[in-house]
Amino acid sequence: MHFRQLRQSVGTMTGYLRVQRAICCFTRFYDLLTEERPLMAIERTLSIIKPDAVAKNVIGKIYSRFETNGLKIIASRMAWLSPQEAGEFYGVHKERPFYKDLVAFMTSGPVMIQVLEGEDAIAKNRDLMGATDPKKAAPGTIRADFAASIDANAVHGSDGPDTAKVEIAFFFPAMNVYSGR
Ligand code: ADP
Ligand code: MG
């Protein structure tokens, strides 16, 4: 084989290897892009620290539960609700026998209202809160630790994406205007 022929075939081989390496790189990049990852649903939910928990001076302790569990407080304000506000907020329970007592309780002192943001924020907040009746709430939940009764049960949390949207807009109307999501 002539020297020139040899150089040509080495050149062809090198070119072939380069193409192969490029294909390999592309395949790896494509795999990385299309790799199956769990869907991360970043949500927002409305939380209220009710008058009983505010009176017990445990706002900070409850906030700490949110923060240590990956929920970010992205808006907050303290308010003393009027009967009209509380009545409208709990409008879905209007026909329930406990509605009047609920409105009376929610207006009995100041509340702390916040928007929580994070992965699966709605369900996560409900898990952290525990069952409506503190006697049935799992140990370590906010209601098990800070609530005294089904009426004075420390916290409110939206129960689904639709209610979260409506409830956030109820207390933080500007968030709907400026929110990126
Ligand atoms: P949650 O706050 O767990 O979402 P609900 O939406 O069912 O519970 O009820 C709203 C609030 O009304 C409760 O947090 C509780 O303070 C009050 N409530 C619910 N059920 C009763 C009941 N059977 N008796 C008295 N109060 C109740
Ligand atoms: Mg509810």
Image (cartoon, rainbow, N blue to C red):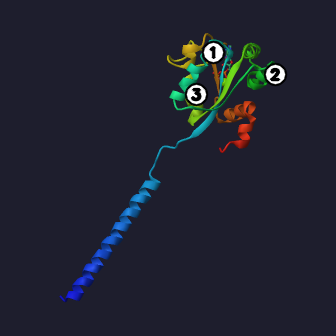
Give whichever of discs 2 and 1 has the lower sequence position. Answer: 1
Residue furthest left as drawn: 1
Give whichever of discs 1 and 3 has the lower sequence position. Answer: 1
| Quadrant in which ligand 1 is drawn | top right
Residue 169 x %, y %: 73, 34
Q: Which mark is residue 84?
A: 2
| Amino acid type of the residue that numbered disc 1 sits on in the rendered structure | Ala
**Viewer-nearest of discs 2 and 1:** 1
> Which residue sits at x=52%, y=44%?
39
> Which residue sits at x=69%, y=32%?
163
Q: Quadrant of the C terminus?
A: top right
The reply to whether callout 3 and callout 2 are in contact (CB within 8 Å) is no
14 left or right, relative to 131? left
Q: Which mark is residue 53?
A: 1
Pick whichever, 83 or 159, lies toward us. Answer: 83
- Within-10-Å neighbours for mark 2: few <14, some 14–19, many 20+: few
Q: Secondary structure at mark 1?
A: helix
| Amino acid type of the residue that numbered disc 3 sits on in the rendered structure | Asn
159 left or right, relative to 145? right
Residue identifier under label 3: 125
